[in-house]
Amino acid sequence: MATTTRITGTRHRTSNIVIIKYNAGNIESVSNALRRLNVTAEITADPEKIINAGKVIFPGVGEASTTMAYLRKTGLGEIIVSLKQPVLGICLGLQLMCSYSEENDTPCLGIFEEKVKRFTPEPGQEYITKVPHMGWNSIHNLKSSIFTKELEGEYVYFVHSYYAAKGEHTAALCNYIVPFSAALQKDNFYATQFHPEKSGPVGAKILENFILL
């Protein structure tokens, strides 16, 4: 099991972290998880603060089409795509960073080329492999710098009906009905389908690794 410690003595590296405020849930739980690491993040929709932040977190729980409409209306979508500092998408954040979601036929931000699909159990398996995929599952084939080697095979917490398919930017794999991208990475953009803020010491270690990039 991965362990983590409160981040101390690294104020210059952990300051100026923002969590993007938009019409999706789960923002406060991410903020609370960071506080447990002795890190304070500002929750904001202010474009200037987001652009000038040292690191940006883009969490979310919700529905793709209405959320993308909101991001386009407010200009937040364009800002997210333009960011040059480390950015971490979580759950819906990962899906919206992909090229397209089957959820209400939604074009997304296109940071990652991977497409988002709905889980479809095999005929007769609906009562065995229920949708949404909810609960603890393990992650494998870790390829991102936010996943240190001791995290291979560890369990993290998922709640989702849609998933990013395996692709060029897959940084971690999970298997539920089909193998899917538990995490993605491209350049300065990182994303997890699971909720690190709800994944105990393993999730805390992943957040710590991102903060210390």
Image (spheres, rainbow, N blue to C red):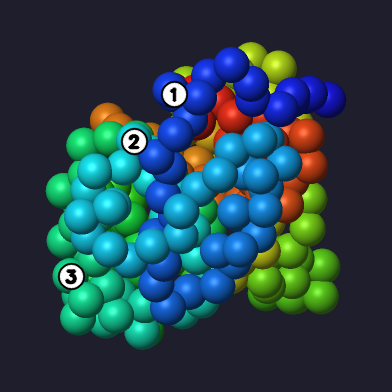
In the figure, 102 relative to 77: above or below? below
* Residue 144, x across and y down, in percent: 46, 25
Amino acid on which disc 3 is placed: Gly
| Looking at the image, residue 126 lies above or below residue 12 | below
Which residue position is annotated with label 1?
13
Read off the residue under disc 3: 75
Is residue 127 visible in the rendered image? The answer is: yes
Residue 116 at least partly seen: no
Residue drawn at x 72%, y 52% is 198
Crowding around mark 1 (Cα neighbors within 10 Å: few <14, some 14 to 19, many 20+) is: few
Q: CA distance from mark 2 to mark 1?
A: 8 Å
The image quarter containing residue 56 is: top left
| Residue 15: % across, % down | 44, 34
The one of 37 and 138 positioned closer to us in this rendering: 37
Q: Which quarter of the rendering shows the C terminus?
A: top left
Under circle 3, the secondary element is: loop
Task: Give the percent coordinates (x, y) of residue 84.
Answer: 21, 37
Q: Decide which of 134, 42 is in the foreground and name it.
A: 42
Q: Do labels 2 and 1 touch, CB within 8 Å?
A: yes
- The kind of secondary structure element at disc 2 is loop
Residue beneath disc 2: 54
Amino acid beneath label 1:
Arg
